[in-house]
Amino acid sequence: MKIIDLSEEHENLYCVCLEDWSSEMDDAGDHKKQWYAKMKARGLRVKLAENDDGKIGGMIQYLPIEESMAEGKDLYFINCIWVHGYKQGRGDFRKQGMGKALLQAAEEDAKALGAKGMVAWGLAIPVFMRASWFKKQGYRKADSMSMQILLWKKFTEDAVEPRWIRPKKKPERLIGKVVITGVLNGWCPSQNISFERAKRAAAEFGDTVVFRAVDTSDLQVFRAWGISDAIFIDDKLITHGPPLTYDKIKRKIARQVKRLRPVY
C-alpha cells in the first residue's frame, strides 16, 4: 500500500468519493468538482490510498481551519477520511490499515506546512467518521454540537483549541408560498444529492413552491448562517445527514403545501 497525492487521473473518482459504481451519484450534480476547483487555491489537500494492485481504496481531504466549518487558527481541518467498504465497485478495503496510513500522511503534511495541529470531526454514534476512531489515533475532544464531536491533536504547545461555528440563521418564510432552502457547501456528494433532489422536487409544484440556494463555499455566507449543508422546508430542517430519497422529499413538500392558507 502507498499514499499518493491526488492527480488529474483520479479527480473524477475523488469527486464521487470512490463510489463510481453508485447510481446515486448521478443525482449529485457537479458541485464537488466546482468546490474542488475553488478550494485548491484556498489550501485544500487530498491524498489517496492505493493498494499493491494499484487500486484506490481510501481518501482523505483536509484544508486550513480558517476555510472550514470550525473556528481556529494555524490548524488543518479534516473534512473527511473515507475507506471504501462496499462489495460493489472496487470492493471492501477496510481492515487493511488505509485509514491510519492516510491520517498519518495528512498529519505529516500539515506539520510540514507549518500547522500547529490537526482537527477532525466525528460522530458520537458508531457510523461514518466515528469520534471513537479518532480518539484511538490520539485525538481528544475540543467541542461538541449534538452528535457532532470536534476533535484535535496538538503538534505544538502553543496551539489554540478549536471550536465549532454554530448555527446562527434560519430561512425566512414567504406568505402564501412554501420555501425550500438548500444550504450547500459542495464538499460532500451526499449533501449534494439532497440539494439536487430537493431542487428538482420543488420545481414540480410550480409557483406555489420557491427554491432558494445558499452557497456556503463563500466564507462570508457560511459565517452568516453557521450551517454548512442542510435542506429546509420553510424554517424546518428536514435533513442534515444521509440523503433522503426524492420521493420522500417530495412528500414532505406536498404536506407543507397542503397546510398553506389561502391568500386573499
Image (spheres, grey):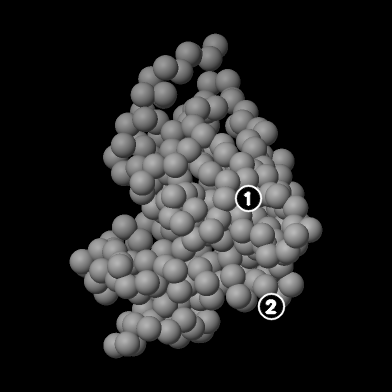
* Of the pair 34 and 140, the residue shown nearer to us: 140
Pick whichever of labels 2 and 1 is earlier in the sequence: 1
Task: Left or right? Give the position of 184 relative to 116.
Answer: left
Q: Is residue 213 visible?
A: no
Q: Which amino acid does label 1 sit on?
A: Met
Which x, y percent locates residue 120? 56, 55
At numbered mark 2, what does the secondary structure look like: helix, strand or loop? helix
| Identity of the residue furthest to the bottom in this view | 53
Q: What residue is drawn where x is 69% and y is 49%?
A: 162
Q: What residue is drawn where x is 36% and y is 30%?
A: 252
Q: What residue is drawn where x is 46% and y is 63%?
A: 81
Given contact means CB atoms under 8 Å apart, are the residues at marks 2 and 1 in contact? no
Which x, y percent locates residue 222? 67, 47
Q: Residue 26 carries which label?
A: none
The C terminus lies in quadrant? top right
Q: Residue 69 carries which label?
A: 1
Q: Which amino acid does label 2 sit on?
A: Ala
Task: Left or right? Give the position of 255 relative to 236.
Answer: left
Q: What residue is drawn where x is 48% and y is 38%?
A: 147
